[in-house]
Image (spheres, rainbow, N blue to C red):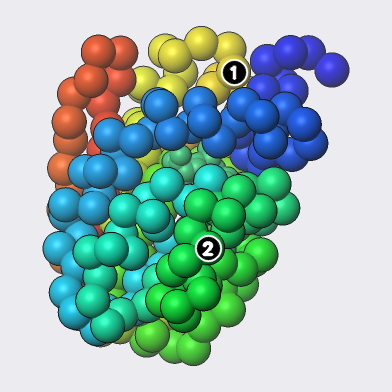
Amino acid sequence: MRLDTFIARQLRKPSGLIGRLFVGKSLNKSNGPLEDMGLELMDLKPGYHVLEIGFGNGRLISKMAPRLHEGTITGIDISDVMIEQARKRNQDFIQSGKVKLLKASVEDIPAEDEYFDRIFTANTIYFWPDPGSDIGEVFRTLKTGGCFYCGMRVREDMLRLGPILKNRDIFKNLYTLDEITAFFKSAGFSQVDYHVKQRKQFADVIVVGQK
Ligand SMILES: C[S@@+](CC[C@H](N)C(=O)[O-])C[C@H]1O[C@@H](n2cnc3c(N)ncnc32)[C@H](O)[C@@H]1O
């Protein structure tokens, strides 16, 4: 297997020794600013139920938990290695019942309809198995009036950033700003907005859809 295919696969689903030793830490370095931008935008209020899809090693969850009073945070991810690391990092919040980390994929979110006030994801939409129906699943579990925050990089940036992110078998769903906005609207979000922060080589983008 080519090295860039191997790395792309690790980014989609960290696994094995490489996933355990390197992937979580390097994700934190490159994606931390995007998560921090999401944390500010989400404006967490007491009692909120929050979901993070594809939490990696749980960095954002460890920052959300101390800020959220009387609410809950659910995280779903498909990688055993990331779940193990995120559970370790957030063990006190898990023990107190504030945080629950589950092995699940975006296409089948283990929650009732209209449960979450806030749903966040960073750099996972590229890998969603069927974005059209997966965003419907996000919409189903979001309360009316609640918001979905989708952190991502736009197609132009992804394709410029080198061979790993150009792998369209793995990074399947790449969007321009216009396309992602149209995609949210067709899923039923009544208001769609986006926030962009330019970094050296790419922009951090968060698309916000209100149900
Ligand atoms: C590139 S990493 C991003 C991790 C973290 N959100 C960040 O920005 O650093 C993608 C994460 O999404 C998870 N993931 C991939 N496909 C998923 C799916 N279908 N449902 C839930 N999580 C998924 C991976 O296991 C991995 O932890």
Q: Position of residue 161 (x, y in %)?
A: 44, 14
Q: Is residue 173 left or right of residue 33?
A: right
Q: Label 1, on which residue? A: 164
**Residue 161 shows in the view:** yes
- Residue at position x 25%, y 70% from top? 68
Amino acid type at circle 2 is: Gln
Q: Work out whether residue 147 or residue 188 is closer to the camera in this orientation and state it.
A: 147
Could you tell me which quadrant the C terminus lies in? bottom left
Q: Tag 1's secondary structure? A: loop
Q: Which residue is mark 2?
A: 91
Q: Residue 28 appears in which quarter of the rendering?
A: top left
Q: Residue at x 23, y 76 (%)?
A: 69
Badge 1 density bin: few <14, some 14–19, many ≥20, Cα 10 Å? some
- Residue at the spot x=51%, y=74% of the render? 95
Using the image, determine if residue 61 lies above or below residue 166.
below
**Of 28 and 54, the residue lying toward us:** 28
Give residue 205's quadrant in the image: top left
Q: Position of residue 39 (x, y in %)?
A: 24, 53
- Is residue 84 placed above or below 5 in the rendered structure? below
Query: What's the distance in space between the residues labelled 2 and 1, CA to CA?
Result: 33 Å
> Which amino acid, mark 1?
Ile
- At 78% from the left and 13% from the top, the residue drawn is 2
| One can see residue 189 in this view | no
Q: Quadrant of residue 88?
A: bottom right
Q: Give the image location of residue 82, x and y in percent.
A: 62, 48
Query: Quarter of the image containing the N terminus?
Result: top right
In the rendered view, does 172 fall on the left or right side of 124? Answer: right
In the image: residue 16, left or right of residue 32? right
Query: Of discs 2 and 1, which sits in the foreground?
Result: 2
Toward the viewer: 95 or 182? Answer: 95
For marks 2 and 1 on the same chain, the one whose residue lies earlier in the sequence:
2
